[in-house]
Amino acid sequence: MDAKLSTAFWALLKRDLRLAYRHRNELLNPLFFFVLVVMLFPLGTSPEKELLMTMAPGVIWVAALLASMLSLDTLFRADFEDGTLEQITLSPHPLSVLVLAKIIAHWLVTGFPMILLAPLLAVFMYLPDEGIGVLMLTLAIGTPILSLIGAIGMGLTVGLRRGGMLLSLIVLPLYIPVLIFSANAVNTYLADLAIRGQIYFLMAVLVLAITLAPIATAAALRISLE
Amino acid sequence: MGDSTSELSVQNIACTRGYRELFTELNFVLGAGQILRVEGKNGSGKTSLLRILAGLAEPADGKVLWQGKGIRHPENNYFQSMLYLGHKPGIKFELSPLENLCMAKALHGSKNENGIEEALYQLGLYGFEEITSGNLSAGQKRRVALAELLLTNARIWILDEPYTSLDVVAIAFLEKLFQQHVQAGGMLVITSHQPVTLDGCDHQRIVLPATELERVA
């Protein structure tokens, strides 16, 4: 990265974090949703320890996935409406790198806090202590994938007035492999089996998403701005 | 004065909105030190033309060339040489004018040494640099966006209705700035419903949907 591109990258990352801080109430919504869904689950089913224990990884992951999807709107919507997205697109720097800065900022304020909240929710759900580490590991690999894939969908739908439904139709099928492999990794670990396969798969998807998603998002944004 | 190769040339471009054809076979060349004023009634495609020139939209037909190559050509530095300010504010209301301009400067990789404080001072925003832009008046918000003109090295300025919500003093300041820019070999494409007085400049206008340039005396 040459000096000027890295200046633009860090400036944009810092700008988005600063904006997120000035809108901290909005930021709490997806996290609140994440905690509430998991907390309401035992009330709707039964508070039995065995039942909750088996459901815990799946429930926590589904909640994380939906919370992350809910938060996608904040990624480009405001910038699209006030015209700053146009200015970002017209920058001489590669749009995909600038978009990556925005995605990282988005993950830092949505995905990252979810990893920190996960142990608390795991305790609510009677997840055995040894499973908590693996749950956090899968979230640490998985939530960046959710932000990266979500950015493509958001890039495609940002120009539509009611793109919410379309966004979930585009993004959810791509989220499902992450959900399956992550929840399965935790359950497998609790059954004392090797989870290397699942972790490798998630890491491979993460690498793929980091390399390709910013390019796809940049292309999608250019279409939306036309 | 700039060399003859640095020119923006538009070849046979057409623009459609839905099924409606806004203009076809539009041709012109804008050289160093020239002003192009785009006129036409509401909905005649002024903004669409400017967005095509800025590279935000693709023309339905034809091409836009900078120094003889397409504006997206990898060897071309079009996006370093061009500044576009559109209808939308282009600034973040949650950030202060100072933060907004720091961002703009980083994004466009401008080598211009003009200080941001100096630019804000010249646009009469001294004392407002730390206030959230959302609390400024409409005209002041516009001034924050226009302060970018003082920070950029861009040769081509593409401005869509820059005078909106500005007061007389600010308009006079801008006109002086445009004159300086053009006399230094810059180019300016502008739309405005208000009369623009730019004396002593190479001044052309196009009235959409007509596709002929006229020279303004």
Image (cartoon, coloured by chain):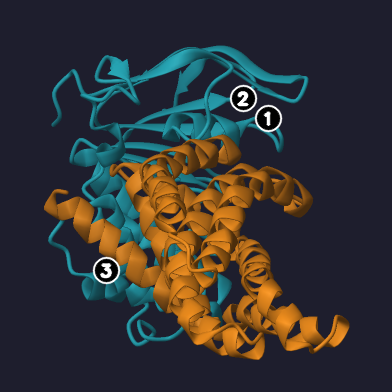
Residues at badges 1 and 3 in contact (C-beta under 8 Å)? Answer: no
Instruction: Report the front residue among B144 and B32.
Output: B144
Which residue is label 3 attached to?
A: B119
Mark 2 is surrounded, within 10 Å at the Cα level, by few (under 14), some (14 to 19) or many (20 or more) other residues, namely many
Q: Is residue A11 above or below residue B43?
A: below
Q: Secondary structure at mark 2?
A: loop
Instruction: Report the front residue among A5 and A106.
Output: A106
Mark 1 is surrounded, within 10 Å at the Cα level, by few (under 14), some (14 to 19) or many (20 or more) other residues, namely some
Dot 1 or dot 3, earlier in sequence? 1
Q: Secondary structure at mark 1?
A: loop
Which residue is most to the front? A192
**Residue A160 at x, y = what percent?**
71, 46
Residue at x 62%, y 24% (from the top left corner): B208
Dot 2 or dot 3, earlier in sequence? 3
Which residue is label 2 attached to?
A: B208
Badge 2 amino acid = Leu
Which residue is label 1 attached to?
A: B44
**Residue B3 at x, y = what percent?**
13, 23
Q: Is residue B95 visible?
A: no
> Residue B129 vs residue A44: left or right?
left
> Residue A63 vs residue A182: left or right?
right
Q: Is residue A34 above or below residue B201?
A: below
